[in-house]
Image: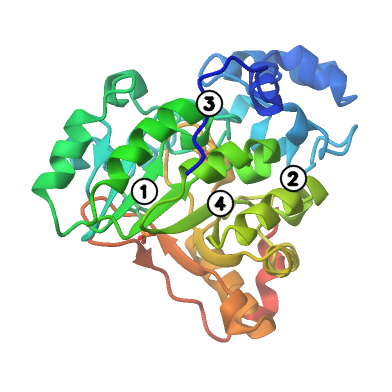
Amino acid sequence: MPRPSAQPSPPPDWRRQLARAVRDPRELLQRLDLPMTLLPAAESAARLFPLRVPEPWLARIRPGDPDDPLLRQVLPLAAEHETPAGFTADPVGDAAAEANPGLLHKYHGRVLLITTGACAIHCRYCFRRHFPYTESQAGRDDWRATLAWLDAHPEVDEVILSGGDPLTLSDRRLATLTEALAQRPQVRRLRLHTRLPVVLPDRITPGLMALLKGPWEVVWVIHSNHAQELDSTVAGALARLREAGHWLLNQTVLLRRINDDADTLAALSRQLFQLGVLPYYLHLLDRVQGAAHFEVTELRARALAAELAARLPGYLVPRLVREEAGEPAKTPVTPLAGSSCNINDSRP
Ligand SMILES: *Cc1c(COP(=O)(O)O)cnc(C)c1O
Ligand code: SF4
């Protein structure tokens, strides 16, 4: 099986794109022809959670439009300083579920590995914005504790690589892990929770595809919130995954003024399917400090889910869920029957 070679070679494009991501709010506003009146708030909120926007994402934002749905996912706003009741630093109970450093075992039969704290993009609504990554990451190239835990839990047949974003790790580091996992026949499914096929499509390289080969099915759960994210470069990356025979699913976070209308969500489902991806979850926002302004009320979310079900074939309707600490699975949220006619009334 081809493995990344030990020969020195120039860093792949995705590494440069990662290193050169925009981190300065002023640069972001200048590049996108946005008013400098947004700068003080952006700079102050970026001190709570740093700005990070890589070039391929920037290229899909409409210049001059402060309401662009891709911009709104990454632009730091003054509202992040608000601390309404019910919004906490660890809304999904990750601290309690940490069975080992960097290993979350919440659900039967599958285990989630925090492989790194790094992401290629910083999504302002992210529930991990307060996660103590430095304490929780698996040590550099040291997966021993994780592997020992797996050996002690033979009933776990699915390993989820998550983070942060697992694909910000180098091929070499990932290969150290997948080579060790491939020696454990209990692992029937290797799952990746990643935004990189969307955010940095160049990350999907032949070297990556080679190191993911193993005695398992590979399942990708990508994360896209709006059809505008899915340009031809993303289509190319997803086509490479499909050619390798991998399963492709998508999760979306329901976000106020980004994708909280039925037209936008239906367009996203259709576009995903066009690219070979099935909609999997539509998440209610995790109630994390600093993200309250993204919240869509549960009532409105349920009405949107009903509207989607009325418009799309069943296999294009994502499951509306919320994550509750201590539950054995994501909690389903029932669509609101009969109310789909007036869902647009509450749009701010
Ligand atoms: C969401 C999550 C999973 C995956 O859940 P599925 O319903 O299988 O997609 C697994 N482990 C943890 C800790 C999770 O948060
Ligand atoms: S973990 Fe996912 S949602 Fe959170 S910042 Fe990283 S890419 Fe965005």
Q: Which residue is mark 4?
A: 222
- Dot 2 amino acid type: Pro
Q: Quick check: 293 left or right of 96?
A: right
- Relative to the observer, which residue lies in front, 276 or 261? 276
Residue 69 numbered mark, or none = 2
Q: Helix or strand or loop: what does disc 1 sit on?
A: strand
Q: Which residue is mark 3?
A: 5
- Dot 4 amino acid type: Ile
- Relative to the observer, which residue lies in front, 306 or 277? 277
The residue drawn where x is 57% and y is 55% is 254
For marks 3 and 1, the one nearer the N-term is: 3
Q: Is residue 340 above or below residue 145?
A: below
Q: Quick check: 328 left or right of 290?
A: left
Q: Is residue 194 visible?
A: no
Q: Quick check: 136 left or right of 315?
A: left
- Dot 3 amino acid type: Ser
The alpha-carbon separation of the residues under discs 3 and 1 comes to 26 Å
The alpha-carbon separation of the residues under discs 4 and 2 comes to 18 Å
